[in-house]
Image (cartoon, helix red, strand yellow):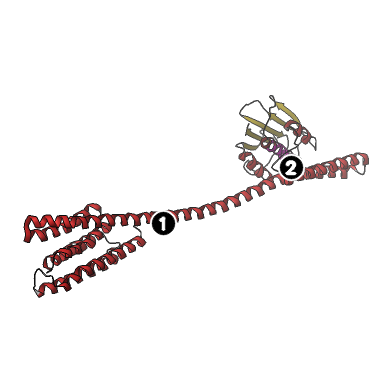
Amino acid sequence: MSNASRRTGSYYSAFAFASVILSCFTGFFQNQYYYGSEWMVLVTFALGAIYTILSVMSGPWLQGRGQGAHCLYYVTQCAVVSGLIFLSPIRGFFGIILLPLAAQSIFDLRPHWAALVISFLYSLNIILWAIPYGWSGAYEAFINYSTAFAFTIIFTIITRQALKARDREEKLREEVEAANLQLQAYAAQAADLATTRERNRLAREIHDGVGHYLTVVKTQLDAATALLPAQPEKARETVQKAARLAGEALDDVRRSVGALHADTGRLPLPDALKELIAQGEPMPTFAIEGAPRPLSSAIEHALFRAAQEGLTNIRKHARASSALLILDFRTPQFIRLELTDNGIGTSHSTTHSGYGLIGLRERIELLGGRLETANRLNGGFALTVEVPA
């Protein structure tokens, strides 16, 4: 039982002992003695005081102690009450002084030890009357004390079970409160994680979309600057193309920030890739292998961003004169996108990449796919993406 229930049990025991002992000793003031020796009265009161003190002080003393302490206590109390009832000058009602100790044993001891203590106390009352009156006295005591002991045992067991039920209820309430606090902490962590993921998703969208368009626009404007002195008309066309790409970049920003979760109004992936490769130099060769099939918007969007990021890196860093973009539908379990160029490759390890490829890898892994980047053996760079579909 919990400490609170043990304290309640101790209060119950102390109250029971005090009430019963007081009731029993009132018989001394009725002058109904079986024996008139004054020393018996004095010894009985002394043993009653010891019995009361031990019972009241036992609760705090026994708490947390082992079986040895409980054994010592109950052996001592059984010895005290044995002398108490046999030396008492009065009989009859005085025998119920054993009942509080029987009730206390149910609270403190295991059932078989409590049964042993109760049997001993019950036997004391039977023997007390059997000695002077024989079997008739024993039978009379059996009838009179059986009801008292039975009521005490049943009432004590019910009280003990009620205290245990209250302990279970209190423990369950504490567990529920702890679980609620833990759920609140998990909810806060989930909210933080969702916010972080959304921020990362927006960052990937802005980088993959706006970053690509700005790279192409810058390339076009640099070309226009170079063409302006000798070929103003060609420079004008280049500037116009840059302006168109800037408009597309603005549309892409609106789609990313305003309706990122919907991806509505997007062209089919092959058509979107054809428009993408036409936006700058070098213009890759585009090939579709296998029969195109419908894909989820999330997969189409991820593959489009992969091609966009790869083309942006080619146009910014590769110094390539040609590139090849392949969209492969031949394997039923996944879609494969491969982008290669004949540029200078990279001096970094294949696992090292900038923010764009890091974000792209996160995007692909969220779909259960994989992204690989590596220098080609015959020169240039290769980016390969596979996603389940």
Residue 14, image x, y percentages? 28, 66
Whether 37 is drawn above or below 353: the answer is: below
Magenta segment main secondary structure: helix
Tell me the kind of residue under disc 2: His
Q: Secondary structure at mark 2?
A: helix
In front here: 209 or 167? 167
Provide the residue designation for mark 2.
Answer: 317
Answer left or right for 359 relative to 170. right
Residue 235, image x, y percentages? 90, 41
In front here: 79 or 283? 79
Over which residues does the magenta segment extend?
301-318
Q: Secondary structure at mark 1?
A: helix
Is residue 316 rendered magenta in the image?
Answer: yes
Answer left or right for 365 relative to 3. right
Provide the residue designation for mark 1.
Answer: 170
> Would residue 344 be visible to someone looking at this image?
no
Kindly check if marks 1 and 2 are in contact, taking CB atoms under 8 A apart as contact: no
Tell me the kind of residue under disc 1: Glu
In front here: 142 or 163? 142
The image quadrant that residue 363 belongs to is top right
Determine the residue positioned at 47% across, 53% down: 176
Residue 61, image x, y percentages? 27, 66
